[in-house]
Amino acid sequence: EMMSHWEDTLPAGTILRVQYEGMVADQRGTAEKMLQFVGLEWEESVANFHESKTKVNTASVAQVRKPIYKSAIGRWKKYEKYIQPLIRALAPHLAVEVERDQGSNEHEEL
């Protein structure tokens, strides 16, 4: 519900939801929607971002140099038993988003 709060608070069209799973499943389609959202056109370099020689100053520099990968999907589940108290505490706030995300195979919320 946190994202719902910001969607209700900010002017319509301010936020574009992007799910990592959607990006992995359809990188080009998701990236095109993101670019369109911010008023930019598609360039092939977007798909090949990991090949860029541009300097990157971020803690995730190693990830920036890799293509998008599926192995991170569901990785959190191996820690699920350790974070159960957190999951239970957040459940009332996340239930709607979890249901919405799992309830559709389409990427409406990209």
Image (spheres, helix red, strand yellow):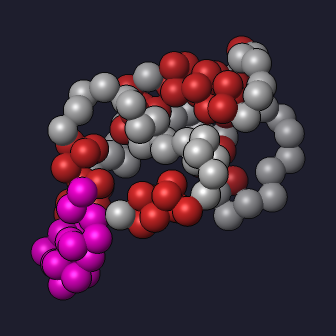
Q: Closest to the observer: 37 or 25?
A: 37
Residue 26 seen? yes
Magenta span covers which residues?
79-96
Picture layout, residue 53 above or below residue 36: below
Residue 1: quadrant of the picture: bottom left
- Which residue sits at x=68%, y=64%? 59
Q: Is residue 102 left or right of residue 51?
A: left
Question: Is 83 in the magenta?
Answer: yes
- Which residue sits at x=60%, y=41%? 13
Q: Is residue 76 left or right of residue 25?
A: left
* Residue 42 x %, y %: 72, 17
Q: Closest to the observer: 20 or 2?
A: 2
- Which residue sits at x=76%, y=28%? 39
* Residue 53 x %, y %: 83, 35
* Residue 105 x %, y %: 24, 28
- Which residue sits at x=51%, y=19%? 29
